């Protein structure tokens, strides 16, 4: 009889221990991640996209380490976001911070170094498009963490039109470059802000070719003075230079319409800036 009682007590202890080890599903954090209307080269997050996630107790400062969640990787499977490990709710409300693309190593929160690609063909433009989102005072009772991303960088679009004196079709060999822009910046993940690296060097960016008449690039927000060329279009061995002053603002699209004439003389090029420039949604 004593053996039976001891065995039953042992089974009960094992059962209780298993209940402690299994977390109820409501304790697992789920994420609803909102996508900007446009990403650099797509209109939705795609399978395999990954974001970095941080969480701190509400109102606590975000740090490189020692947070409730530290640079957790969430990957989109085409339907939902999955963590590299299961993430559980804290007993207290938290503030969440997220950025795309996933950064495997973050050495600073207030002064993180990031650079756009100098060749933005292929996946270069996508790698340059830095997105950010945050959600404050979120707890288990909210059901999920909702994160709405926005663009931290600037985007420039160059559209080419034929002027009255341009004969024939625009050739297939058109290449577009952006000159004299600083490609490195400093990011503050806590504030969701970015600024040009004051000690960064100016580089030339090869724009992504969308078509013979449309080119796009992601730039670090900065002011460009008119004293230096901004855009160069090369076609048929002829280079067309665009000089203009622009203030590339974070989260904005800047559209330039360039009218070309047959003559390579810069005075023959008509240039207009699209007044519809606005938020990069």
Image: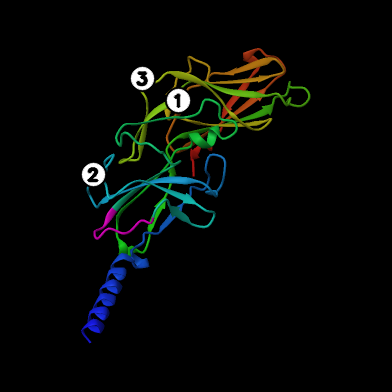
- Considering only vertical position in the picture, is 190 above or below 202? below
Q: Splitting the image into 4 quarters, where does residue 65 fall? A: top left
- Along the horizontal axis of the image, is 13 left or right of 185? left
Of labels 1 and 3, earlier in sequence is 1
Q: Residue at x 67, y 31 (%)?
A: 213
Q: Quadrant of the N terminus?
A: bottom left
- Considering only vertical position in the picture, is 81 above or below 255? below
Residue 16 percent location from the top left of the image: 27, 72
Whether residue 209 appears in magenta in the rendering, the answer is no
Residue range corresponding to the magenta coloring: 86-94
Q: Splitting the image into 4 quarters, where does residue 266 fall? A: top right
Of labels 1 and 2, earlier in sequence is 2
Q: Dot 3: few (<14), some (14–19), or many (≥20) neighbours within 10 Å?
A: few
Q: What label sits on residue 61 in the rendered view?
A: 2
- Can residue 246 be seen here? The reply is yes
User: Which residue in the protein does label 1 denote?
Assistant: 183
Q: Nearer the viewer, residue 204 or 2?
A: 2
Residue 194 percent location from the top left of the image: 37, 33
As helix, strand or loop, the secondary structure at mark 3 comes to loop
Residue furthest to the top: 265
User: Which residue in the protein does label 3 denote?
Assistant: 199
Q: Residue at x 28, y 67 (%)?
A: 20
Residue 159 percent location from the top left of the image: 62, 31
């Amino acid at each position: 009889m004593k053996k039976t009682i001891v065995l039953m007590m042992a089974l009960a202890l094992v059962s209780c221990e298993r209940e402690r080890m299994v977390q109820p599903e409501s304790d697992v954090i789920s994420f609803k991640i909102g996508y900007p209307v446009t990403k650099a080269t797509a209109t939705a997050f795609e399978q395999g996209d990954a974001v970095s996630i941080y969480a701190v107790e509400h109102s606590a400062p975000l740090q490189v380490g020692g947070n409730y969640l530290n640079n957790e990787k969430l990957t989109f499977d085409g339907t939902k976001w999955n963590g590299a490990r299961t993430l559980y709710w804290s007993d207290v409300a938290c503030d969440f911070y997220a950025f795309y693309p996933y950064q495997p190593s973050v050495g600073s929160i207030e002064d993180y170094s990031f650079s756009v690609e100098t060749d933005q063909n292929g996946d270069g433009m996508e790698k340059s498009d830095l997105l950010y989102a945050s959600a404050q005072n979120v707890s288990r009772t909210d059901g999920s963490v909702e994160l709405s991303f926005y663009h931290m960088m600037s985007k420039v679009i160059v559209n080419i039109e034929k002027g009255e004196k341009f004969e024939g079709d625009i050739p297939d060999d058109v290449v577009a470059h952006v000159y004299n822009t600083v490609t490195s910046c400093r990011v503050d993940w806590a504030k969701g802000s970015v600024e040009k690296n004051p000690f960064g060097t100016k580089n030339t960016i090869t724009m992504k070719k969308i078509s013979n008449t449309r080119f796009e690039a992601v730039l670090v927000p900065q002011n460009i003075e008119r004293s230096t060329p901004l855009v160069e279009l090369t076609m048929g061995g002829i280079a067309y230079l665009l000089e203009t002053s622009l203030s590339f603002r974070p989260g904005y699209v800047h559209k330039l319409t360039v009218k070309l004439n047959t003559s390579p003389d810069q005075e023959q090029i008509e240039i207009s800036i699209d007044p519809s420039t606005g938020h990069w949604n």
